[in-house]
Image: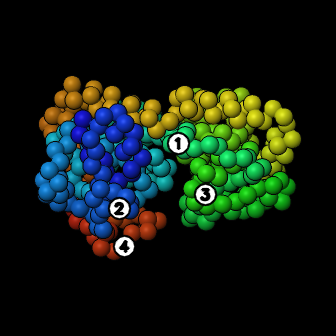
Amino acid sequence: MRVLCLDGPYFLKALERLGCETLSVGQWSGADVRLEKALSLAGLLRLLDARGFEPEAALWADDGRPPSVAGLELLPWPTIAYSIDQYLNPWHVPFCNAFDAALVAQKDYLPLFAPEHKGPLRWMPLFADPLPGAIPPPARDIPASFVGTLDSPANPGRRPFLEAFRRHAPLAVLTGDYRSVFARSRLALNQSAAGELNFRVFQAMAEGAALLTEDAANGLRDLFTPGRHLLVYPRGDHRAAAALAQQALADPGLEELARAGQAEVLARHRVDHRAQEIVRLFEELARAQVHRARFSDMGRSRRLMATAYRILATDPQLPLPPELRAFYLELAHAGGDAR
């Protein structure tokens, strides 16, 4: 299967391991086609023609930025959208509902998508992309770690929480590649922006660190059992989190919990598992010719896209340059028609 991968690059290697041929288009540095500005549908089709790439399916994945290509509702193949941070991006709801299928990473947000969606709508949690198994694991010389952005406007409570935690328990606070840090950590601390299940939940356990995370919703207890796979603390309670960390680090059973969490993630929550789900869904959509139904109801799809573009153009919280806002506003005024 030839899959056009737009924006988020998470599944490229996993899809290729499944025998798919991929072409990635987006703003990230490693994309096959790196875009410097948003592209129209006509521009995308010219690009594909120049590359000699004829997709059989298209996957849009949330990478934390506005969509880099407009007019995706007009693509003549089965399409899937994967929304990760819908709690930060209300435009995801109308945007994803213009695809043949929508996958939503945060379980509690599924009802927001349901009223408008006509095709498959499913919860697909995030996942881990573990370090290659051929690399010998390093010594676990970091008692407890946190790896992540410290001063995101979307999460103003993170730095105060971490600083308060460190007054009561040891914690290495780092940024960058969390996989290598978690592979050296006995305990990994997680804190979220809005109680979401973020990548840190899965990646920490995949690298063999015991996870200490918020007792969050969004499907956490559907996937893992506290006390067996991970440890949980009340959201925002730095004292409780620090006390649990100190207790865990002194407990000889911590390694057993870490091994159980790692086994669960590696057995069910690797990127390869999600890629297999995506390929099966594409095959289901192709058999049912769902994209033909999308074309027969194009007015609905354009209305949804126009709503998404209007939100992008007018949301003051989005750090968009004026020319990009103008681009989205023009699309909204055109009723979502991005041809």
Q: Is residue 339 left or right of residue 325?
A: left
Q: Nearer the viewer, mark 1 or mark 3?
A: 1
Give the percent coordinates (x, y) of residue 274: 43, 34
Q: Mark 4 or mark 3, which is nearer the start of the sequence?
A: 3
Mark 2 Cα-neighbour bin, 10 Å: few <14, some 14–19, many ≥20: many
Image mark for residue 27:
2
Residue toward you, 59 or 88: 59
Sequence-wise, the earlier of marks 4 and 1 is 1
Query: What is the three-letter code of the residue carrying label 3?
Result: Gly
Q: In the image, which is nearer the foreground, mark 1 or mark 2?
A: 1
Crowding near pointer 3: few (<14 within 10 Å), some, many (20+)? some
Q: Which residue is mark 1?
A: 132
Q: Tell me the quarter of the image containing the N terminus.
A: top left
On the image, numbered disc 4 is attached to which residue? Answer: 321
Residue at (56% x, 65% y) in the render? 153
Residue plotted at (26% across, 41% down): 21
Marks 2/3: CA–CA distance: 21 Å
Residue at horizontal 33 percent and vertical 28 percent from the top: 280
Residue 310, by quadrant, is: bottom left
Q: Check if mark 4's residue and mark 1's residue have beta carbons within 8 Å.
A: no
Image quadrant occupied by the C terminus? bottom left
Q: Amino acid at mark 1?
A: Pro
Measure how far apart labels 4 and 1 are at the Cα level: 39 Å
| Residue 59 seen by the camera | yes
Between marks 3 and 4, how big is the CA–CA gap? Answer: 25 Å
**Among the two numbered marks 1 and 2 on one chain, the one whose residue lies closer to the N terminus:** 2
Please state if 174 lies on the left or on the right of 252 as rendered. left
Q: Secondary structure at mark 1?
A: loop
Q: Residue at x 39, y 43 (%)?
A: 13
Residue placed under numbered mark 3 in the picture: 148
